[in-house]
Image (cartoon, grey):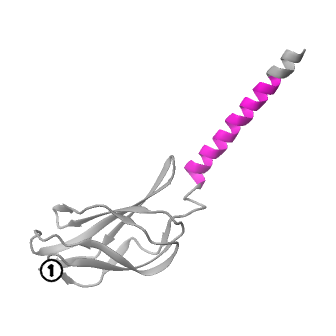
Amino acid sequence: MKLKNLERCWISINLIAILVCFIVLGYWKFIDGEYVNIPLTYGSNTLTVDSPEYNQGEPIFANWKFCKGVNMVSKINSNIIDGVVWYLPEIDGVREKGCYDKMDVIAKVPESIPNGKYHVEMKVEYKLNPIKTKIYHFKTNDFLIK
């Protein structure tokens, strides 16, 4: 008699533990970052650079209104593109939670890049939890490098 009650108790505990795991995994996969703890809110995926022309070695700034909803570091990958992709080093985005009108340097023009018409494509990545990463893609308007 006692053994059956003990078995029922263990079965109940195991079922509750499995249910809790499914709830946590479901929250991490489907809710976190989509409905709560949203990393970024913004109006457009197109950023406007500060200047129509840049020289080799100059930083590129972008005008862009966005709000950061979490205090976590993001990984930012920027590439300068003119048909050929110029890969730039990955940087960490360390801004605090809040709303901003102007972004920091989104890229630095390499010294060896030839003259021409370019744009920047940027990927901002947030690691929200152990199983979910949220990635945002952005692109700038065209500019010249002299």
Vertical position of residue 6 compared to residue 47: above or below: above
> Picture coordinates of residue 15 (x, y %)?
73, 31
Element at badge 1? loop
Vertical position of residue 36 compared to residue 114: above or below: above
Q: Residue at x 32, y 69 (%)?
A: 139
Q: Point out the image quarter for the N terminus.
A: top right
Q: Residue at x 49, y 72 (%)?
A: 96
In the shown orientation, is residue 89 left or right of residue 104?
left
> Picture coordinates of residue 37 (x, y %)?
57, 62
At label 1, the amino acid type is Asn
> Picture coordinates of residue 19 (x, y %)?
70, 38
Q: Which residue is drawn at 23% across and 63% down?
A: 88
Region in magenta:
8-31
Residue denoted by label 1: 55
In the shown orientation, is residue 139 left or right of residue 54?
right
Q: Residues within 10 Å of mark 1 (few under 14, many from 20)?
A: some
In the shown orientation, is residue 31 left or right of residue 7?
left
Q: How many labels were placed on the picture?
A: 1
Please state which of residues 57 and 15 is positioned toward the viewer in this rendering. 57
